[in-house]
Amino acid sequence: MTDPGSRPLDGVRVIDCTQMLSGPFATQMLADMGATVIKIERPETGDITRAIEPTVGDSGMTSYFASLNRGKRSVVLDLSSPQGADALARLAADADVIVENYRAGLMEEWGLGYDSLSELSDDLIYCSISGFGPGPYEDVPAFDMVVQALGGSMSITGESDGQPLRSGLPIGDICAGMYAVIGIVTALHSVDRHGGQRIDVPMFEGLVSWLSERAGWTFATGEPYQRRGNVHPSLAPYRVFDTEDGWLALAIGSQGTWLSLCEALDRPDLAADPRFETNSDRVANRAALASELADVFVQDDAESWFERLREASVPAAPVNDTAEVFETPQIRASEATSDLTLGGVDMPFVEFPVGFSELRSGDVSEPPVHGEHTRTVLSEVMDEAAVDDLMGE
């Protein structure tokens, strides 16, 4: 039996040379699973997100940084200097994983690329997150919105008669971060057989892979997938409806749930209406059906509809905002949330949201102050005089 207090990546040491979102999101998940994550930050400014407001309570730390760097150890190094590069090489020699998302080629310019650092450890896993894989777009600045635009997801997001919209979530960054974790954990699993290796994770190709069945539809029809807002191309009713106090999302995916909906609404006439008899009929007459249902849902509040339809096993839910979602009983009861309080503000982040029968994940730890662990971490791989010299003391 595995020690119930252990975590999947206990004992794994990660050097985190990332900033902004994609890389820190990846290394945050590794930290949640038990890895020791040493975050390398630039002198004076640190991670760019330390300056992106708002700040959290009286902590002096921004919510952006705090959201992605919990439980990490912050080490300040100027990697462009010979001393800083040498210190990172020493850390790498004692590490299992390095993750970086700098401009392509920058780590190599500093002598810190995979070819150089892998000479220090045969088992080193070196993960690079970039905007694009090898090809003509390699030099395109890879901000999330740019990747969403080039990757097709913006073209299918928004109302049919409106402009393309980026996702409300930075899906290009998050997609790359998740693929990075998958790649790293896979490489760790095979390190005994294959040794270390380099992993390249491009945001663009990753997000294009998320088109999945949308791409399949395009291949099958020869036509671009169209923006449809909340309307499903082949199911109805499948959309949001206004209620007495907010929006309700309704997703009917089968004939059985359609009949259950009609019963829950006490509208047997809708089930008997030939315009709505089958899903194909409902799709063909979706505007008329939406009009009928709109008159019903506006008569009560979203939470009441949620409970009523839930009892009938009809897929529907209020559209929560980002404050309301953390007040739901599900999140409050979830073992995946942290009890972190920062600067007097409760921040119940969802940590690594995967349950293991014999392991645990998550670690309620504050994000680090800039450079908080520089001396402690460097002293593990350098003598005190060298650390003093590097820190200018």
Image (spheres, rainbow, N blue to C red):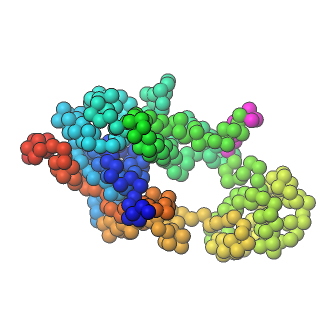
Q: Where is residue 326 in the image (x, y as percent from the top left)?
A: 49, 67
**Which of 114/225 is in front?**
114
Counting every numbered tag in the picture gives 0
Q: In this view, does 155 lie above or below 377?
A: above
Q: Is the magenta stretch mostly helix, strand or loop?
A: loop
Residue 294: in magenta span = no
Q: Can residue 385 be seen in this view?
A: yes
Q: Position of residue 184 (x, y in %)?
A: 43, 43
**Which of 85/355 is in front?**
355
Which quadrant would the N terminus be assigned to in this image? bottom left
Left/right of residue 262 with respect to residue 232 in the rendered view: right
Residue at 47 percent across and 68 percent down: it is: 335
Left/right of residue 314 with respect to residue 211 in the rendered view: right
**Which of 103/187 is in front?**
187
Q: Most extreme residue toward the front, as rendered?
A: 1
Q: Give the range drawn in magenta.
A: 220-227
